[in-house]
Image: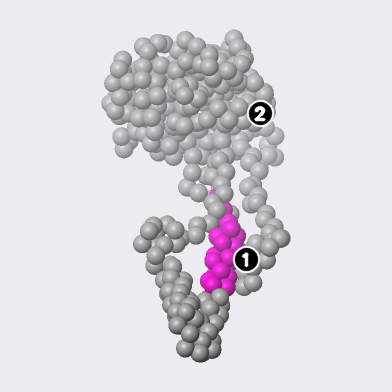
Amino acid sequence: MAGVPASTPECDTAAGEIKSMNRTADCTSPEPVVYGSRQVCCCKETIQPYVPAKFILPDLQIKIPGLTLTPTDQIVTEKNDDGSYGVSIPWIAEYIEAIYNYGLGIVGILAALVLMGGGVLWLISGGDVSKITQAKEMIIGSIVGMMIMASSYIILYQINPELTRLKNVELGGFAREAFTPDIDSATPLSLDMNGISSVLGVTCGKSSIAEIINQAKGKVTYNNPNRGKTGPDNTVYNDCSGFAAFVLKCARDKNTDTYTGDIFKDQAIWDQDLNKMQPGDFVGWAPKNNKSGSGHVLIYMGNGIFGDCHGGESGRKSGNCIGNNISYARIIKYATTHSDGNLYIKRY
């Protein structure tokens, strides 16, 4: 994006609206914006609109009389607060309910037939005590069966209320991951270690990597210009590399690079072997590995789990930038969707 034509309608020079930027000062329109130590073009990020999943009504191999499945046009994909999407599918619950109701009907008919059979047997018993006894057993058994059938809901509810609740199948997806270009190495980072550790509720030198990241959940807001500083409402500001620097400094008293371009400048490709990983290892990519110019760094927490401070729309919400349960599978996905196909590793 080296130079944006004046006719481009999506560009916005408001500093608060910077979402993606080039890495050169060769920008004449719109007016350059000084961000950190660089002149950049600011331009709204183009994101493809979310297309809700389409569902096809199941073709049932065993059809249940009286079963009516919810039409597909009534199954709506909804956006969650974290930006992810979810949909509730009622078809399995409806099918089980239909089987239950159909079974009740069959049991009711059988009980009525047994009841009538007992009555007929009594009538034709001719005073035979054994046949009368058999007839009584059939009548009593059918009545008891109908009583159990009629009270089955109450019995199940008394055993466990959850047995009476047929839940829909909930399908969902991850929120769209968005990473923001971080400030370059010429912009110094000043970490307010005492202030940040106080807000997070951690003790530097004693708290572990995982404890610091877990404690940071809900307390860090993604903000490049103010990274490393305390914020309002018992929060702090940071970006991915600034947060990683704080975590390692607080847990291990190690100084790190504070820009992803410097962290991963040696381009050591991660072999994706978790057995070789140590808590505090950095994994991610440099801006040059991403066509949109955004680098990112994640911190290994141990037990196959990673943490980070991510940007995007959700990360800029107050206290919302920390991920503390990022799986190996998602890390690998990042390599294909945000990097050049590789993930890079750095150990300080």
Residue 6 image offset from top left, x and y in percent: 68, 36
Residue, x 32% and y 28% (percent of image)? Answer: 200
Determine whether 344 is above or below 80 in the image: above
Q: Assess disc 1: are there few (<14), some (14-19) or many (≥20) residues with their C-alpha within 10 Å of its C-alpha.
A: some
The residue under label 2 is 336
What mark, if any, has residue 107 been given in the picture?
Answer: none
Residue 293: image quadrant is top right
In the image, residue 87 lies in the stretch drawn in magenta: yes
- The 10 Å Cα crowd at callout 2, few under 14, some 14 to 19, many 20 or more, is few
Q: Is residue 242 above or below residue 31?
A: above
Q: Position of residue 268 (x, y in %)?
A: 60, 12
Amino acid type for the residue under numbered disc 1: Leu
Left or right for 193, reference 51: left
Residue 261, x across and y down, in percent: 56, 16
Q: Toward which corner of the image does residue 285 lie, by quadrant?
A: top right
Magenta residue check for 103 = yes
Look at the numbered disc 1 and give the secondary structure of its residue.
loop
Horizontal side of residue 73 vs 158, given as left or right:
right
- Residue placed under numbered mark 1 in the picture: 69
Rendered image quadrant of residue 174: top right
Q: Quadrant of the N terminus?
A: top right
What span is in magenta?
Answer: 86-108
Q: CA distance from mark 2 to mark 1?
A: 39 Å
- From where the camera sits, is residue 171 visible? yes
Comparing 90 with 73, the one in front is 90
Q: Nearer the viewer, mark 2 or mark 1?
A: 1
- Tell me the chief SS of the magenta region: helix
